[in-house]
Image (tube, rainbow, N blue to C red):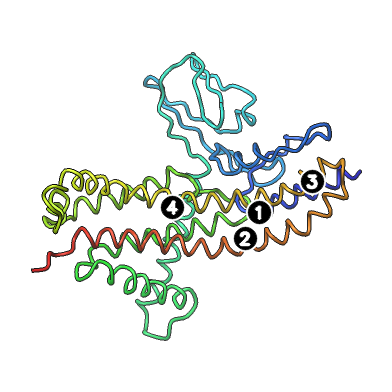
């Protein structure tokens, strides 16, 4: 009975924390020590279905292109990875969150995963929010209200204090990109804190693409002075040039790398910490064997979880700010005119 109550509480807590994605078919055994690692890794990973709670999941479309043939079906056909999907001479299965073909046939995977679906949803949400706010400016001028009153000071802050102050006179050319990046990261950070949501900005592929966008803009926009500083840093003695030039060129690639890792690591760490703190309850109770220890640890764990959750809300805004700020700084360094 105690074990059943603990399992019920565990399930309730887990569906209430950010981006929960634990399958209910993973039963805990009182004979084995509770191991939170598989649950944590499953939680932060991408998947081919949108898990909500218990056995409730939303199947997503699997789109595969194999040897000139399109194979389209719903992820529910995999039945949580236990079965295979056969399409002619092609046999697909899920192995460690990845679709593989048993006959080693090469294929292109264009499936809509949980992260992709979440990004489509957040992009649509961002469009609707901005569109509604912009419509308010086309009407008779009145004091900002509703979503407009929230967005206007945020947009002005990002434009004036982040973009304009770091890029300079040429800031308007990059305002649209940096504002989009700021709100895209912010919305996905906040959505990731809701029950059942996807861990989008905690996926290194997403942060990699965002940093690549910044890298491309820096490379295209860079003036002659920027490239001149790479091959001949000002004030550097001639004897040190063989050392400084490789360092400067290496720095070109470390900038987007820092953007990618910073966002990915901070968001992922927050999810892992919350999950680990909750897991302490069941590690202490040894899956119900020592219920007193579990109930003793529970108040402390829950208190720390609530504290970390509030910190994560701050981090959601902070990481959007930092990514946009660093992008603006890097772009500003690339377009800055030489002082004469």
Counting from the top left corner in percent of width and height, residue 274 is at 64, 53
The foreground one among 140 and 223 is 223
Are discs 1 and 2 less than 8 Å apart at CB? yes
Q: With 196 as the anchor, is 29 left or right in this view? A: right
Residue at the bottom extreme, as displayed:
142
Q: Which residue is mark 2?
A: 309
Q: How many numbered discs, if any?
A: 4
- Comparing labels 3 and 2, the label whose residue is closer to the camera: 3
Calculate the distance from the C-alpha at mark 3 to the C-alpha at mark 4.
33 Å
**Horizontal relation, residue 219 to residue 21: left or right:** left
Q: Quadrant of the N terminus?
A: top right
Q: Nearer the viewer, residue 84 or 6?
A: 6
Q: Residue at x 20, y 67 (%)?
A: 170
Badge 1 is on which residue? 17
| Whether residue 275 is situated above or below residue 313 in the rendered picture | above
> Along the polypeptide, which appears first: circle 1 or circle 2?
1
Q: Secondary structure at mark 3?
A: helix
Secondary element at tag 2: helix
């Amino acid at each position: 009975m105690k074990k059943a109550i603990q399992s019920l509480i565990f399930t309730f807590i887990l569906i209430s924390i950010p981006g929960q994605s634990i399958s209910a078919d993973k039963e805990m055994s009182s004979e084995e020590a509770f191991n939170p690692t598989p649950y944590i890794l499953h939680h932060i990973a991408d998947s081919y279905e949108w898990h909500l709670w218990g056995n409730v999941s939303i199947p997503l479309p699997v789109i595969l292109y194999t040897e000139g043939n399109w194979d389209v079906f719903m992820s529910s056909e995999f039945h949580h990875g236990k079965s295979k999907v056969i399409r002619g001479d092609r046999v697909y299965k899920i192995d460690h969150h990845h679709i593989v073909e048993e006959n080693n046939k090469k294929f292109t995977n264009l499936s809509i995963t949980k992260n992709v679906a979440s990004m489509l949803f957040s992009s649509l949400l961002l469009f609707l929010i901005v569109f509604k706010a912009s419509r308010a400016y086309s009407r008779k001028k009145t004091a900002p209200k509703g979503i407009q009153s929230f967005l206007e000071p945020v947009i002005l802050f990002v434009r004036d204090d982040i973009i304009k102050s770091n890029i300079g006179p040429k800031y308007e050319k990059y305002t649209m990109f940096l504002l989009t990046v700021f709100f895209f990261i912010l919305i996905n950070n906040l959505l990731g804190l809701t029950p059942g949501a996807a861990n989008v900005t905690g996926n290194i592929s997403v942060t990699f693409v965002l940093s690549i966008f910044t890298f491309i803009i820096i490379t295209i926009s860079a003036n002659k002075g920027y490239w001149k500083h790479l091959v001949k840093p000002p004030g550097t003695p001639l004897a040190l040039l063989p050392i400084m030039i490789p360092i400067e060129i290496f720095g070109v690639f470390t900038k987007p790398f820092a953007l990618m890792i910073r966002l990915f690591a901070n968001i992922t760490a927050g999810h892992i910490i919350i999950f680990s703190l909750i897991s302490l309850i069941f590690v202490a109770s040894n899956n119900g064997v020592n219920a007193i220890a579990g109930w003793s640890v529970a108040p402390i764990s829950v208190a720390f979880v609530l504290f970390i959750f509030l910190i994560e809300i701050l981090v959601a805004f902070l990481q959007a700010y930092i990514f946009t700020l660093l992008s603006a700084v890097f772009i500003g360094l690339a377009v800055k005119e030489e002082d004469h």
